[in-house]
Image (cartoon, rainbow, N blue to C red):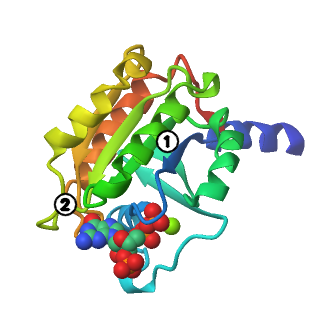
Amino acid sequence: MYHLAKGIYQNLTRKEEYSVLILGLDNAGKTTFLEQLKHVYSGRGLPPDKIAPTVGQNVGHLKINEMYLKIWDVGGQRNLRTLWKAYYTEAHAIVFIVDSTDRARIEECRDTLRAIVSDQDTEGIPVLMLANKQDRDDSLEVEDIKEIFNRIAEHLSARDSRVLPISAIKGTGVAEAADWLTSRLARNKQYRPPDLR
Ligand code: G3D
Ligand code: MG
């Protein structure tokens, strides 16, 4: 009887959880974005001056718009990028962060995104591109970023994708990004169902 009751209880309390992968070149603002999400949706999160370059990974568990998300921020240095692939099969969505002020590496950024979206393990999952650092005067406009990424549109056509402007440091656009993400996770639920925890 105890075991039956325990089993029923566990079934009722199991949560659906989605994994979101935050990718992008090093210095794009991935960790700042994750900490800002934590700040907005859980009241916690590190202040920007306490964020060090990421070695390995950071994970955040957040409830956003009634959905449980496990958000992975994986290091973006070139030698760490080969590790990303290991996360693809588990991911329900990808957030790709672009440093809009880093004109010198915009091509590298585009090539990196192309490699991600042409990998068969990411097929069909929503991709949100965030043009970060929009608070800076020297940042590229979101339209310019879209133009650059248009060239990989053929890899994105069969799935949901969007480019949105944000400032991870100030929090501008972060709620809109989270709203887009959760709506697309829900829409894609049949295709890539959540994990039960
Ligand atoms: P990463 O995790 O992608 O490697 P970080 O990037 O989150 O560590 O951020 C890299 C640098 O960019 C940090 O500056 C951080 O404060 C800055 N940054 C992140 N987001 C924004 C933003 O929206 N606007 C501006 N102006 N800066 C941002 P430091 O100086 O600490 O290296
Ligand atoms: Mg980092």
Image quadrant in which the N terminus is located: top right
The answer to whether marks 1 and 2 mark residues whose Cβ atoms lie closer than 8 Å is: no
Measured in 3D between alpha carbons, the distance from the residue under mark 1 to the one under mark 2, in whole angstroms, is 25 Å
Q: Earlier in the sequence, mark 1 or mark 2?
A: 1
- Image check: 58 left or right of 94? right
The residue tagged 1 is 112
- Say which element carries label 2: loop
Find residue 120 and report its horizontal and vertical position in percent: 62, 22
Query: What is the number of callouts on the image?
Result: 2
* Residue 47 in view (yes/no): no
The residue lying at 43 percent from left, 74 percent from top is 45
Could you tell me the amino acid type at mark 1? Thr
The residue tagged 2 is 172
* Residue 168 in view (yes/no): yes
Closer to us: 49 or 181: 49
Q: In which quarter of the image is residue 37?
A: bottom left
Q: Quadrant of residue 85?
A: top right
The residue lying at 50 percent from left, 29 percent from top is 117
- Image check: 121 left or right of 153? right
Q: In which quarter of the image is residue 92?
A: top right
Query: On screen, 175 above or below 193?
Result: below
Find residue 186 and report its horizontal and vertical position in percent: 42, 28
